[in-house]
Image: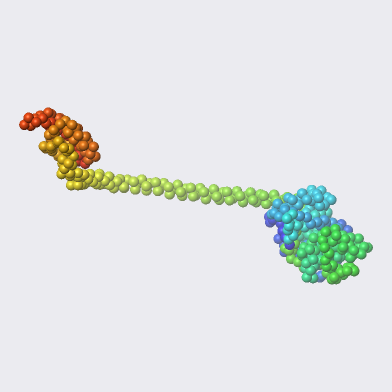
Amino acid sequence: MGLAGNHKQRHPVVGEFLSRNSSHCDIVVEWSNREVTVFDKSTRRTEHYPAGATLPYSGQTAILAISRRAIFVRAARVPNAAPEDIRMVVQIKLTELFPVPPSDLAYDFILLNDLNVEGRLALIVAMPVSELKKAYAAMSAAGIKVIRTIPVALGSDFLAESLGRRDAAVVEQTDDLASVDLVVDGMLRYSRVVAPGAPLEVEVSRTYNAAGLPCSTIIAAGNALVGDADTTTSNTALASLADVAPERFKINLTLPEVLAARELASRRWRQSFALLVFVVALSVSTLTFLDYNAAATKASAQRAKNTNDLKPFDTDRANAKALADRETTIATTLATAFKPAQKMYDMTTLAANLAPAGVWITGISVERGKEMTVRGTATSNDAVAAYNSALGSETRYRNVRLTFANDASIEKIPVVQFSISLFPVGNLPIALQQKSGA
């Protein structure tokens, strides 16, 4: 039947009149300022008592059903949200729906299945706090233990259900009043008290028009005389409430001060629980930190020990690397010696091939890792200069320079004797000088 707005808290409040834990009732009491009607579940009898009379049901548990005269029943659209949020919206709507200030009302609501773009439909019931206190006082004076307070019109839901009807107008009639309860999709949607003298079939149509609902099946409850009734039954809404487990009534009218006491107790419980969770979390965090700190200290000590243990190996590795580097240097030197960039005959052959006409090579001196010297005789200084230029342009030589060029004669023929020094590229020494160490 939906969710009620004030059924969240389950904490007992000292002095609270209602019992929320009982799941059994002995009687159903319909209360109003004029008359009290009691349906005894065991005897299946209905008794009527004037208001203020002593009720002979001391010690019994009861569903307190508020008469249609003393309670307001309205349906209104609310946001499709959580019940605790909807309750705040309903509290604001009380001013629009009922002719009593919200501060003077005890109210509750049920969320119905009707949902559209405007929100979810809620059935809102309310009654003056002063009237609810009177009802509780009457029950207390009679020694009756109330387990839930609901509108008696809610019994029309179950009466229609017992007859296999989900949409119906349930009509009842007594000596001083008649009532029309509209049930839509198995839920009470509208309740109205009418004068008993008017034709009830006419009042049913008026009630449907007032609620803005299409007409449906008419059930004449309590053998009411309704001309257009589709079904007539001796059962009543009050008697139907006795046949339903109290847990199915998802609504319960409660005094505002009781709700406030419950909320205070709940808030204190939540605060205590939050404090307990905080203390537990703090304890767990402290223990975790201590464990972590101990483990970190142990790990740090182990790391220091490992570092000390590795020092000899680090020294050995450094010595091995130095030895390997030395061997690599020697190997490179040997490779250079046995595989030079230019062989000796390459150096001399190239120098001889570059000599132009008019130049004769008389001697070439070359040693590994040293400059190469080319000596010769030329017919002119121009020939010497051309030879020197040719050697300088060759990429396989560097630092080419004319050492001397002297005029001479051979058998009275003038000649020029010259000497050119150069360094063949890649002419490395066989052995590199090594640094001596301790």
Where is residue 230? Give x, y as percent. 85, 70
Q: Quadrant of residue 123?
A: bottom right
Quarter of the figure that contains the N terminus: bottom right
Residue at 78% across / 53% down in the picture? 106
Q: Quadrant of residue 245?
A: bottom right
Residue at 76% across / 66% down in the picture? 244
Q: Residue furthest right?
A: 197
Task: Decide if residue 58 is in sight here.
Answer: no
Where is residue 318? Give x, y as percent. 27, 45
Residue at 55% across / 50% down in the picture? 281
Towards the viewer: 134 or 142: 134
Q: In the rendered image of this protein, does residue 376 appear above or below residue 171?
A: above
Q: How many marks?
A: 0
Q: Is residue 318 left or right of residue 104?
A: left
Q: Is residue 172 left or right of residue 115?
A: right
Q: In the rendered image of this protein, does residue 257 appear above or below residue 368?
A: below
Where is residue 220? Give x, y as percent. 86, 68
For the rendered model, the colour scheme is rainbow
Q: Is residue 268 left or right of residue 216?
A: left
Q: Residue furthest left?
A: 411
Towards the viewer: 194 or 356: 356
Task: Decide if residue 95 is in sight here.
Answer: yes
Towards the viewer: 117 or 271: 117
Where is residue 43? Give x, y as percent. 81, 70
Quarter of the figure that contains the C terminus: top left
Residue at 20% across / 34% down in the picture? 386
Q: Residue furthest front?
A: 413
